[in-house]
Image (cartoon, rainbow, N blue to C red):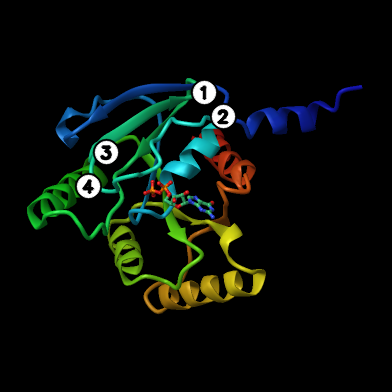
């Protein structure tokens, strides 16, 4: 006999349907939406495109970067006809003009301050390197803006268990200097196809609660 509870859970933790909504160069171009929005963001090269492709179980939903920082736009996908995945351009890419950087920082600021249906932001942090100042600054900014966010550690396959644990601990220590409570943190690896269930389950749990 089919165990309906397990079945429902497994179906729950899947992304079955992905529809590209569009790529929008400016915040003011973003269509308003009734769907709750979950945003994915992080430093350029953190593994965001790879993670999005893995979560969606598709090869090329998001372009794995050959030229990071080149195309900067708000990319949106409607998932399972029930929520929006927002793919924000990565920050911290060095080879981009100051003007362009500034323009994008403004657009992101408008988005973070003004997106009415933004439900949760997933901030991706590369677990294979030591904590980066720019990530900590971003976290502090999100906290100050009261944006709810979770941390997704990426590329967990790249380090030994010990090194991974050290990097995570250093990161937590750094964040703890500024904040009393830490956000939920999950480990992922697009390379080893690890972490999807927990991310999609977290999204589904939030969707159920609203
Ligand atoms: P983005 O710039 O944040 O979109 O990052 P990409 O998805 O383009 O990935 C940047 C680089 O990291 C690419 O060379 C990927 O192959 C690599 N990468 C991404 N995810 C993983 C992962 O889970 N494990 C490993 N080992 N490499 C990864």
In the image, taking residue 182 as reference, residue 114 lies left or right, namely left
The circle on residue 15 is 2
The circle on residue 80 is 1
Question: Of helix, strand and loop, which one carries label 2?
Answer: loop
Question: Of helix, strand and loop, which one carries label 4?
Answer: helix
Residue 162: x %, y % from top left: 64, 74
The residue where tag 4 is placed is 108
| Residue count near mark 2 (Cα–Cα under 10 Å), binned few <14, some 14–19, many ≥20 | some
In the image, taking residue 9 as reference, residue 86 lies left or right, namely left
Q: Indicate which label's residue lies in the foreground, 3 or 4.
A: 4
* Earlier-in-chain disc, 3 versus 4: 4
Residue 22: x %, y % from top left: 29, 24
| Residue count near mark 3 (Cα–Cα under 10 Å), binned few <14, some 14–19, many ≥20 | some
| Residue lying at 27% horizontally and 36% vertically, measured from the top left | 74
Q: Nearer the viewer, residue 122 or 113?
A: 122
| Residue lying at 16% horizontally and 35% vertically, measured from the top left | 26
Are the residues tagged 3 and 2 within 8 Å (C-beta)?
Answer: no
Quarter assignment of residue 25: top left
* Earlier-in-chain disc, 3 versus 2: 2
**Image position of 55 with respect to 151: above or below:** above
Residue 16 visible, this orientation: yes
Residue 15: x %, y % from top left: 56, 29
Are the residues tagged 1 and 4 within 8 Å (C-beta)?
Answer: no
Are the residues tagged 4 and 2 within 8 Å (C-beta)?
Answer: no
Label 3, label 4: how many angstroms apart (C-alpha)? 10 Å
Q: Indicate which label's residue lies in the foreground, 1 or 3.
A: 1
* Earlier-in-chain disc, 1 versus 2: 2
Label 1, label 3: how many angstroms apart (C-alpha)? 21 Å
Q: Is the CB–ligand 1 distance for label 3 below 8 Å?
A: no
The residue where tag 3 is placed is 115
């Amino acid at each position: 006999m089919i165990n309906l509870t397990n079945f429902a859970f497994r179906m729950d933790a899947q992304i079955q349907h992905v529809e590209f909504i569009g790529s929008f160069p400016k915040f003011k171009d973003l269509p308003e939406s009734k769907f709750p929005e979950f945003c994915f963001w992080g430093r350029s090269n953190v593994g965001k495109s790879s993670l999005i492709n893995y979560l969606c179980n598709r090869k090329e939903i998001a372009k794995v970067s050959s030229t990071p920082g080149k195309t900067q736009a708000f990319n949106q996908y409607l998932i399972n006809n029930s929520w929006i995945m927002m793919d924000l351009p990565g920050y911290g890419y060095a080879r981009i003009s100051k003007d362009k950087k500034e323009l994008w920082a403004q657009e992101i600021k408008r988005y973070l301050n003004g997106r009415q249906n933004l439900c949760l932001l997933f901030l991706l942090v590369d677990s294979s390197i030591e904590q980066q100042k720019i990530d900590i600054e971003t976290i502090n900014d999100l906290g100050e803006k009261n944006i709810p966010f979770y941390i997704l550690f990426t590329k967990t396959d790249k380090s030994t268990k010990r090194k991974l644990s050290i990097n995570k601990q250093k990161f937590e220590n750094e964040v703890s200097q500024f904040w009393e409570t830490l956000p939920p943190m999950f480990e992922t690896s697009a390379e080893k196809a690890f972490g999807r269930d927990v991310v999609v389950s977290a999204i589904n749990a939030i969707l159920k609660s609203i």
